[in-house]
Amino acid sequence: MEYLPLFVEVTARSCLVVGGGEIAARKASLLLKANAKVTIVAPEVSASTQALIDNDEVSWIQSVFVKEQLTSQMLVIAATDKMDVNKAVYQQAKAQNILVNVADCPELCDFILPSILDRSPLVVAISSGGHSPILARQLRARLETLIPPAYGRLASLVGRYRDAVKTKFNKLSMRRRFWESLLQGQVVDHVLAGRDDMAEQTLNHILNDVSDQELQQGEVYLVGAGPGDPELLTFKALRLMQQADVVFYDRLVSKEILALVRKEAEQIYVGKQRDWHAVRQEEINQLLLEHAQQGKRVLRLKGGDPFIFGRGGEEIETLAAENIHFQVVPGVTAASGCATYAGIPLTHRDYSQSCTFVTGQLKHGELKLNWSALVQPRQTVVIYMGLGGLPVLSQQLLSHGMAADTPAALIQQGTTEHQKVWISTIAELPAVAEREKPVAPTLIIIGDVVKLHDSLAWFNQ
Ligand code: SAH
């Protein structure tokens, strides 16, 4: 981070603006919004600055800048069109240890003024660290559409109840639970619909009736994190990721996705690799159960979709047996994510009528699959966990009658910036893997649809 974001109280504190033009007036107005005591220094002023002076909103020192004007100022903003004046303000402020900002000149700034989304008391500040104020402004415009103006009223309403909630729930974790469930429910709907009175009634009702025990229920969220690209997460996945107390994650969950989990959540790695298991499946089932029984919101984050070669079913069976609440969130499975990002439409009607997902994981060096079913024409076969068994796989498909020139693809780390695609045939695929040494995770797609990669590949080209 190049700058430390801070929200600073400036109410009734002296702040100096050097300059009398439009930009200076805008900076002064911003300071006034936060109730600062603003003085403007300028030999002459523009109409908008004059208006502030006439309304007694700011004081005006009608002169050029001299260093004495900095005495007892908390901060100073220089916004003149004369670079030598701006520089002098900067140097003098530095010498006196006063925070300084020179408009549009990041190298002469101790602090920068972010792009602001004002839903007071809720305020979102965005900064590009001076690298691209326009980008920050565009981002702000996007947030503008995401955060309804009513959120300001919502923040004021719940702010009035902070003390009451503190009195009722003296444990921090309980208070957090209370607020999180409250802020997902009817109270918010009422405020958004402009029914603030009803929102307050509902809030009171919930506050008085909810018991510690109800709040203390643990729950498990079994969430599919998709194949890698964080933008392929579902909204629901993201929401639950942001309210978890503890997260158990797999090797397939990317760093970028983990970074979206609530910062305070404890992160526990329970990843598996082909030949060894960091934590055995039964232990994972048990860990989820124990943490939920302690009243925690447990996020079980899995690559792809939890119900597709993800053993998600086993994990929730244990929970169901113990009457622990759980929710399952589907994710984009590797077949879908990788095929799409490799430009391979799995069921393009000119080539394929069905698509089969199979596991290629070897058991004791063997692969027991329904081979004759896999060699049917006009079918796409997607193989998960097939890298280790690729030679066996290729040889079995060939000996069960698959044409040697059937197109086949290897997709390594699909949907991520490291995605690599190798196109070959089922006969040649083992040699390609031997030569190129793809790393996990890699998916195999077999069938005529693979031909379309040539013309339809669009990602990471
Ligand atoms: N539940 C997961 C699959 C877990 S099995 C899902 O729905 O996607 C693990 C296998 O999935 C890996 O061996 C690999 O074959 C495949 N896989 C998962 N993510 C992948 C990715 N980003 N790129 C390529 N293959 C992937």
Image (tube, grey):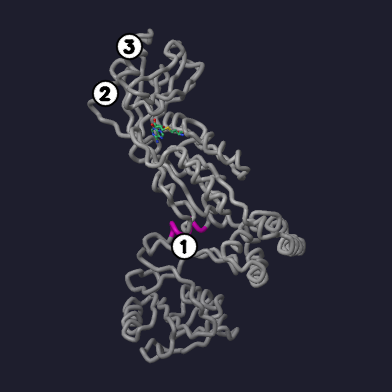
Q: Circle 2 sits on which residue?
A: 432
Task: Work out how far the residue at label 1 is from the one at label 3, CA to CA, in angstroms.
Answer: 57 Å
Name the amino acid, label 1.
Answer: Ile
Identity of the residue drawn at 74% across and 64% down: 208
- Could you tell me which secondary element the residue under label 3 belongs to? loop
Query: Where does residue 144 sit, x and y in percent of width and height?
Result: 56, 57
Of the four image quadrants, the one with ligand 1 is: top left
- In the depicted view, which residue is nearer to us: 51 or 159? 159
Query: Where does residue 116 sit, x and y in percent of width and height?
Result: 51, 65
Query: Where does residue 157 sit, x and y in percent of width and height?
Result: 67, 67
The crowd level at tag 2 (other Cα within 10 Å; few <14, some 14-19, many 20+) is some
Compared to 135, does 307 lie above or below?
A: above
Identity of the residue drawn at 32% across and 26% down: 388
- Residue 136 among magenta residues: yes
Query: Where does residue 134 sit, x and y in percent of width and height?
Result: 44, 59
- Residue 150 among magenta residues: no
Q: Circle 3 sits on which residue?
A: 404
Task: Work out how far the residue at label 3 is from the one at label 2, CA to CA, in angstroms.
Answer: 14 Å
- In the depicted view, which residue is nearer to us: 306 or 443? 306
User: What's the mark number on residue 126?
Assistant: 1
Name the amino acid, label 2.
Answer: Val
Badge 1 residue CB within 8 Å of ligand 1: no
> Which residues lie in the magenta part?
134-140
- Could you tell me which secondary element the residue under label 1 belongs to? strand
Task: Work out how far the residue at label 1 is from the one at label 2, CA to CA, in angstroms.
Answer: 48 Å
Answer whether residue 255 is visible to the viewer in this image: yes
Looking at the image, is mark 1 or mark 2 nearer the viewer? 2
Identity of the residue drawn at 35% across and 13% down: 396
The crowd level at tag 3 (other Cα within 10 Å; few <14, some 14-19, many 20+) is some
